[in-house]
Image: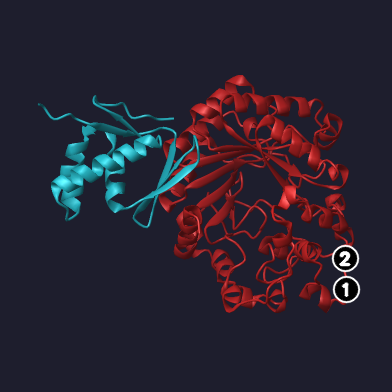
Amino acid sequence: MPETCIYIARSSAIAARALAGEMMVMNSADSTFFTLNEVATTIFQAADGHTPLRDIVRDHVCEQFDVDPEQAQADAEQFVAELSGHGILLVSSQPLASETP
Amino acid sequence: MSLMSEVGQKAFNLGVPLAVHMDVTYRCNERCVHCYLDHDDHGEMTTAEIKDVLDQLAEAGVFFITFSGGEVLLRRDFFEIVEYARRLMFNVKIKTNAVMIHEEEARRIRELGVDTIQISVYSHRPEVHDAITKLPHSFERTVKAIRFLREQGLRVTIANVLMTVNSSDHSGVQALAAELGVQYTLDPTITPMMDGDMSVLSLRIPGEELTEIFRNPALVGNQEEFCAPPKPPSEEDLEGYSCSAGHSFCYISPYGDVFPCVQFPLPTGNIRQQKFFDIWNFSPQMNEVRSIKAKDLTVCSSCSHVGSCSRCPGLAYMEGSMRGPSTADCEKSFYRTGIATANMLRQGLSKPRTMASNTASLIQIRPIAVPA
């Protein structure tokens, strides 16, 4: 069975800014506020809608951090599911156009 | 401590300007009786200048930006500015009187992902609100706009400035806010006018009426806690700072002047002459503001209220010294707890002087002259 590709993009409803290596993210729709650790920040910043999640993990996360690739992929999928549930990330099996206000 | 408080403390400790208040114009379509602004345009920043400032603020780490005025929608490029700010991923808040917001504007604000819209409402009685704004039918237009914004699912806060002419209306405005499904905030602060005219201070509600407000649980929450006598100041209190002004917050005027706060008219530089980064990091005035700890305050360091007072260093500066007391806050501390402040005791006062009789000379925000 072929592996499903996941594409992720940042929602246009969010505000985000890096503070000392961590990303602050706020969803204006419900004012939920998050801070992302360095690994999560790397995924968030690479969420351009065109790059598959597995490529983001391979080319960014595994390149920059000393992590097990399989574990990193599993953690990334969990992280993406969580942020998508809060409307921070958009997830699709097809490439996504980046949302801009 | 909430996550937001933790982040605020982190920015404070690192000296990152987490939040900026930017007035994009001082022009206004209302003429509120208590307003401190000069509404003439003395050379507002252009669209390109504001976009450049926003680029610099994003680079500096600013996350929260509040656009205010004057009336922001008098700028024809206002939505272009907000759109640019949102592309830079700022959290955007807008302060407006809302009289120019109709269905189309409300929809645009929602599309742009604006976080909150704060709207001034002075009374639930149209005739009182309109008499304060001096704009006929402004109450009707403002309330209609709030309904348009709510229909778009936007978060709205009604800001209720209290003064002598509307001091009995806060319950009515609170009920109106509840009916409209919006937040309510009350502010009894009246600021002297930019040209130094203090006549507007006569609109400040008498201190005795503050007592009633401070004992109203609907306004202050846990009244017992809010009005509790001050605890003896701790070492931590004395090593602490007054507020975030100049530490993680600043104000930018429509002319590019940078101040520690909208209520702290100490000029620190102009963005048309210097980069924001240089003003924020190297302005001697900004660095002086952020060097002042509670233990350095001339009168307040010995005051029993020092750990709990809302002392505003900007209002203190307007009274003559950023290290001195702010009489308006002394008054609030006294009427909140019934305990005299050090500032009152040194003057032999058993209760604060009324603000109308406060003759301290005041310094106000004025445009900094920019060479042609």
Tag 1: amino acid = Leu
* Outermost top residue: B104
Chain coloured cyan here: A
Q: Which residue is mark 2?
A: B353
The image shows residue B50 at horizontal and vertical percentages of 52, 41
The image shows residue A87 at horizontal and vertical percentages of 40, 34
Q: Nearer the viewer, residue A37 or B280?
A: A37
Name the residue at 49% across, 34% down. A29
Residue B322 can be seen in this image: yes
Tag 2: amino acid = Arg
Which numbered circle lies on residue B349?
1
Q: Where B121 sits versus B200, above or below?
A: above
Horizontally, is B65 left or right of B32 in the view? left
Residue B32 can be seen in this image: no
Chain on which label 2 sits = B
- Secondary structure, mark 1, is loop
